[in-house]
Amino acid sequence: MSLYPDVHFIKSAPRPADFVADDGVEVAFAGRSNAGKSSALNLLVQRRALARTSKTPGRTQMINFFHLREGARLVDLPGYGYARVPDRVKRQWHDLMGGYFDRRGSLSGLFLIMDCRHPMTRFDEQMLALASAVQCPVHVLLTKADKLSRGKAASALLGVRKELGGRASAQLFSATKGTGADEARDCLEQMLDSE
């Protein structure tokens, strides 16, 4: 049984003026396109197609708001760093992300999704900087852990934790195998209950 039986899509926002009301609490999900952000979000809320997954990275080009429960939302931020899109669109994404982090008083946490085989890109560093600027706690999901041997996955986690240096917590995760789902849900609940 899902912890979030009432989870549902609210709206997509192409610009800050379209954001939902800034009340209650919300936790955002961000990550490089093709890191498995939508799959992670779907697994955590136990809803198969809440966030749309795609074979074409970079499909999420707006900020998507989801009702989680009364007074709580999830926010799916645009994927970054992979999709072959015009510079104009990249600038729009950058402005949209900056507008989101600058304006959201209800933001209580960020899940930063990284492929455990390719972690800590410059785009991930930019997201960490955005979150740090507004003192937003960050939890890193190192996705696709099933693609590595247990030893290599553990080594990747150790390396990321060292590189983060206390700026964020981190864990291994696999949407395919369900690895780390309970730990991630616990972290999500802590972020939602932070107020």
Image: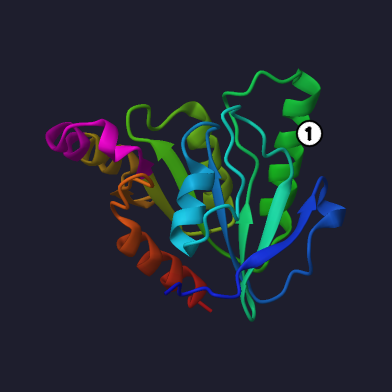
Tell me the amino acid under the disc marked 1: Gln
How busy is the neighbourhood of tag 1: few (under 14 within 10 Å), some, or many (20 plus)? some
Across and down, in percent, residue 131 comes to: 55, 51
Image location (x, y in percent) of residue 17: 87, 55
Magenta portion: prevailing SS class: helix
Q: Is residue 188 above or below residue 85?
A: below
Instruction: Give the number of callouts.
Output: 1
Rendered residue at 56%/29% (across/down) = 55
Asked if the magenta segment contains residue 164, the reply would be: no
The residue sitting at 60% across, 50% down in the picture is 51
Q: Is residue 108 above or below residue 24?
A: above
Q: Quadrant of residue 96?
A: top right
**Residue matched to label 1:** 92
Magenta span of residues: 142-155
Side of 141 relative to 157 (left or right) = right
Residue at point 34%, 42% (across, down): 164
- Specify whether residue 143 is painted magenta: yes
Label 1 SS: helix
